[in-house]
Amino acid sequence: MCISGGEPTIYAEGLLELIKTIKTLDVQVPFKIKLDTNGLCPDVLEQVLTGEFAVDYVAMDIKAPFDKYGEVIKADIGRKVKESMEIVNKYEDITLECRTTYCPKLLTEEDLFTIVDEVECDLYTIQQFRNRCVLDESLAEAEEPNPHDMEDIAKRIKEAYPNQDINVKTAEFGQKSI
């Protein structure tokens, strides 16, 4: 079961209640829960990782190198995202996937290398930016990255960070492990 959003951690009370409800369902095989988050609310994240009703998997969007959040997304929350990542990493039994949507208008290849250097996660995924439905209208005409170029970038990252599991996710080819 995946809890996604918007950003589910901004609804702390409802999120905690939803997780508890799912975890206490009377089913033969208990549900595993994945939480998609942007890391904005580290205090709430801490709550959903503890106790008998903890989530099992966290997929955290890493929008930019931590010191470039303000420039890239116009909200300087990089330190909160880093804190959230550090909180998840305290729990060895919870999988952490960090993922970055690669939009060449916003990020460079070098930025992706910086992100991989800054994160500590079980899996790092580079996702293809798609300009079909965007909240920021300035990105409506932004060029979508070529999936072959993305795979090449991922291979170079894997060479530089051989111990990091790397995936590439594109519309054309789906998800691929590098």
Image: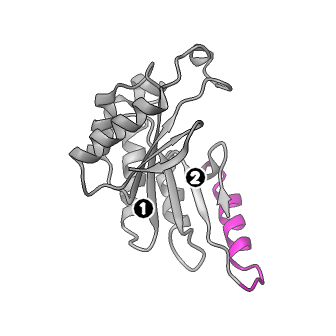
Q: Is residue 161 magenta?
A: no
Image vertical order of residue 19 relative to residue 141, above or below:
below
Image vertical order of residue 70 relative to residue 41, above or below:
above
Question: Could you say which quadrant of the image residue 28 lies in?
Answer: bottom right
Residue 177 image point, x, y percent: 43, 52
Q: Main secondary structure of the magenta part?
A: helix
Q: Is residue 28 visible?
A: yes
On screen, residue 112 versus residue 7, left or right, reads left
The quadrant the N terminus occupies is bottom right
Residue 61 image point, x, y percent: 49, 44
Mark 1 or mark 2: whose residue is earlier in sequence: 2
On screen, residue 122 versus residue 43, left or right, reads left
- Which region of the structure is painted magenta? 10-28
Q: Which residue is mark 2?
A: 36
Question: Could you say which quadrant of the image residue 110 lies in?
Answer: top left
On screen, residue 103 versus residue 1, left or right, reads left
Question: Could you say which quadrant of the image residue 163 lies in?
Answer: bottom left
Q: Which residue is mark 1?
A: 88
Which residue is pictured at 62% across the width and 48% down the height? 10
Q: Which mark is residue 106?
A: none
Q: Residue reaching furthest right?
A: 26
- What's the distance in space between the residues labelled 1 and 2, CA to CA? 13 Å
Q: Amino acid at mark 2?
A: Asp
Which residue is pictured at 66% across the width and 57% down the height? 3
Q: In the image shown, does 78 or 30 lie closer to the viewer?
A: 30
Q: Is residue 65 visible?
A: no
At label 1, counting other C-alpha atoms closer than 10 Å, the crowd grade (few under 14, some 14-19, many 20 or more) is many
Residue 45 image point, x, y percent: 51, 58
